Image (cartoon, rainbow, N blue to C red):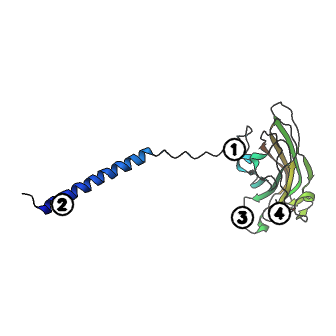
Amino acid sequence: MTSPLRRRVSASLVGVAALVALSGCNLGSFSTSEKAPPAAASPSPSPTPTFDSQFTHDGTFQSHVEIDGVDFVYTLYPTKSTPRTNEWFPKGNKYFSFTFQAYDLDRDLRDPFKTKRRVFLDRIEVESATTTTSGTVERPYTLNAKAQTITFDPEPLAGKYGMLVTSPKGAFELRNQPIGDLAADTKGVTLTFRASVRIQRSAGSSSYERETIRQEVPIAIFASDKPTQAAQIPVDAN
């Protein structure tokens, strides 16, 4: 014969088991009746350029041209006026800046400057040509000048061969150069840089060799009916 205490314990265990089963059923019903959360909206992709351009993709361009152990470095970047290169459209001004320097690779960067070969920049030239779907070619930007008369530094280190561009004592810099209105079907602009330089044969030597450092820089232009938006920037901004 079962005692009253044992009957109460058994009844309690049955009640707990039933509650657990019921709770599990309710939780299962809750989870299956809830709708799955909506997927997060994907951000709109940036326009895909149809003109291959490191400058446009990376937001800057740098090249290294080595001649006789001297590394000539062109660096091109958009200015703060029009910094978003994926919003460079045919209409409106698009602004860029560029620098040009030389490094004597025969010496370590921290070696005394007097042990490095001097490089002087005489003239800097830039030509441009557009690529369009119609085949029409425009030349929206040109430059041909004595480097020391237009560089950002009003008092560059200069000599009879031009301005010094051996790093770290010298560098050519030109800021906020505009590429203006282009034909509506323009896909890109290619800038061709030419720097006429004199390279010292050895540190302290009076003998120099003449070279021309050439570099092409493609820039993508995106189709749009609206003009490129240019912001006002301080006169000393780059």
Earlier-in-chain disc, 1 versus 3: 1
Residue identified by numbered label 2: 9
Secondary element under disc 1, as helix, strand or loop, is loop
Where's residue 224, x and y in %? 79, 40
Residues under labels 4 and 3: Cα distance?
14 Å
Crowd class of label 3 (few under 14; some 14 to 19; many from 20; radius 10 Å): few
The structure residue drawn at horizontal position 14% and vertical position 60%, both measured from the top left corner, is: 6
Residues under labels 4 and 2: Cα distance?
94 Å
Contact between labelled residues 2 and 4, with CB atoms less than 8 Å apart = no
Q: Amino acid at mark 4?
A: Gly
Secondary element under disc 3, as helix, strand or loop, is loop
The structure residue drawn at horizontal position 52% and vertical position 47%, both measured from the top left corner, is: 37
Where's residue 225, x and y in %? 82, 39
Residue identified by numbered label 1: 46
Residue identified by numbered label 4: 170
Residues under labels 3 and 2: Cα distance?
87 Å
